Image (cartoon, rainbow, N blue to C red):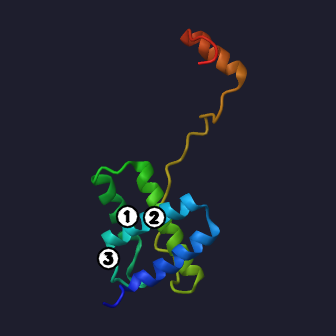
Amino acid sequence: MKPAIMEKYVGKFEGITLMTLRYTTYTNYARFLETFMDWAGWDRTPESFDGFTVEDFKVQRLKEGATPGRVYAELAAVRRFFQWLVEEGVLQKNPCKGRVTMPAQDPRLAKKLRPVDQQTLRKQARMPPGI
């Protein structure tokens, strides 16, 4: 049986990600790309993908109950894959460009509280130190 059109591109991309990214990232990208291609169709040509395809995938995954974080992680892999196709000269433009956006993080949220803020929070919550 002849391999599907997109299999060779996905295979090459996975080979590069295996050599250049952490193994966990590689396995996630491989799984996320498979999810996308199973949905979109392996027999399509790279040129047949557009921003609407990516948007439809995002909507469908959310309807299926995938968490927004999971969907954005999947879309990050898809976006990187299509960017690689652009870099390889297979595509003229990335169909994800301008379509795959991450929700903005509130800049007021601190990554880590300062010790003085931790003490204030504990006092207000009446929690003992060390918790």
In the displayed structure image, the side of residue 97 where residue 43 appears, left or right: left
Would you place residue 95 above or below residue 59 in this image? below
> Which of disc 3 and disc 2 is earlier in sequence?
3
* Camera-nearest residue between 22 and 70: 22
Q: Give the residue at x 51% y 72%.
A: 81
> Which of disc 1 and disc 2 is earlier in sequence?
1
Q: Confirm or deny contact between disc 1 and disc 3 (CB under 8 A).
A: no
Residue under numbered circle 3: 41
Secondary structure at badge 2 equals loop
Would you place residue 106 above or below residue 11 in this image? above
Amino acid type shown at disc 1: Glu
Would you place residue 119 above or below residue 105 in this image? above
Q: Between tags 1 and 3, which lies in front?
A: 3
CA–CA distance in space, label 2 to label 1: 7 Å
Residue found at the far bottom of this picture: 2
In the displayed structure image, the side of residue 120 where residue 12 appears, left or right: left
Residue under numbered circle 2: 99
Other residues around mark 1 within 10 Å, as few (<14) / some (14–19) / many (≥20)? some
Q: Give the residue at x 47% y 81%.
A: 9
Secondary structure at badge 1 equals helix
Q: Confirm or deny contact between disc 2 and disc 1 (CB under 8 A).
A: yes
Amino acid type shown at disc 2: Arg
Q: Which mark is residue 55?
A: 1
Where is the C terminus found, in terms of image quarters? Answer: top right
Q: Give the residue at x 41% y 81%.
A: 7
Where is the N terminus found, in terms of image quarters? Answer: bottom left
Q: Between tags 2 and 3, which lies in front?
A: 3
Secondary structure at badge 3 equals loop
Percent of width and height locating residue 63:
28, 53
